[in-house]
Amino acid sequence: MEPVYSSVITTARGVFAAQGLKFRMEGEDNVPRTGGAVMAINHTGYFDFTYAGLAARKSKRLVRFMAKQSIFSHRVAGPLMRGMKHIPVDRKDGRASFYRAVQALKDGEIVGVFPEATMSRSFELKEFKPGAVRMAQEAGVPILPTTLWGSQRVWSKNVPKHMGRSGIPIFITVGAPIHVAPDANRAEATAHLQEVMTAQLHAQQAAYPELTGDDLIYQPARLGGQAPTPDEAKAQDHHDMNRTVDKFNKGRKA
């Protein structure tokens, strides 16, 4: 076990215990004990990467996550991210991070990616980017379809967070590995991955304890919850993106 990663895992498990989080994991045996794999994960909360990584513990594996480059510049998080050998992603030009991830996969690592690219405010799956499929093809490794449910109740965008002792259930499922042929159509393979993960997520939602009252803000509108619909969430994402671009342009003019 690597010292930095080991220390972070120990600390994280202590925090999870203090929070009283109740993990239900399925499909842990689908994580290979050796060899590379792309762990494709849905994204509804800020701690998704820490929860998804727990699914690899039974196989005694560590997951190298792809994360935005700005995190690696943080004075505290940066050294930890580098110490755990995570992979920085430059969203303006992701070629270097892509090839770094492919090399890690060829070297036998498990690389964690979020095919939606950004967090889903609707708590439904957003349209997938083809990066996960492309990496798996390039490296000749399987994809592990991994879904989380409940993490949005701990900390997500524009909703109250619960960082104290909450006893929130967190469901984690790793589906059967998906093998993508070298000559497979990437768009079709990406659509298949999303279909598999959608089915997994819906099964988790059906089995999850019923949400009522104020907790309905963490429930998708499709299930009678108060979360934004996918179209409303897309409009909010577009607004935030434009605001960020405007702020950047104003800074350049100044």
Image: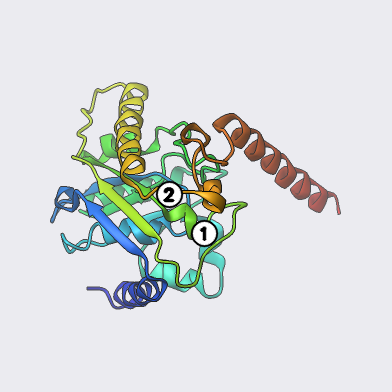
Please tell me which of labels 2 and 1 falls first in the chain. 2
Q: Secondary structure at mark 1?
A: loop
State the image quarter where residue 15 is shown: bottom left
Q: Count residues near mark 1 (Cα–Cα under 10 Å), then give few for <14, some for 14-19, many for 20+.
A: some
Q: Secondary structure at mark 2?
A: helix
Residue at the right extreme of this rendering: 254
38 or 124, nearer to the observer = 124
Q: Which mark is residue 254?
A: none
Colouring scheme applied when the structure was drawn: rainbow
- Give the vertical position of 191 relative to 250 (above or below): above
Which numbered circle lies on residue 97?
2
Q: Is residue 153 left or right of residue 180?
A: right
**Image quarter of the C terminus:** bottom right
Quadrant assignment for the N terminus? bottom left
Q: Amino acid at mark 1?
A: Trp
Mark 2: which amino acid? Ser
* Outermost residue, front side: 213
Image x and y of residue 250, in percent: 82, 49
Which residue, given by chain and number where applicable, does mark 1 sit on?
155
The answer to whether residue 88 shows anywhere in this view is no
Of 54 and 62, which appears nearest the observer? 54
Relative placement, left or right, of 2 versus 131 is left
How far across and down, in percent of the image, does residue 145 sit? 28, 41
Say which of marks 2 and 1 sits in front. Answer: 1
* Residue 211 vertical placement versus 200 (above, below): below
Looking at the image, residue 8 lies above or below residue 123: below
The quadrant in which residue 167 appears is bottom left
- For residue 148, side relative to residue 33 (left or right): right
Q: Residue at x 35, y 31 (%)?
A: 194
* Residue at left offset 75%, top offset 49%: 248
| Residue 246 rendering spot, x and y as whole percentages | 77, 44
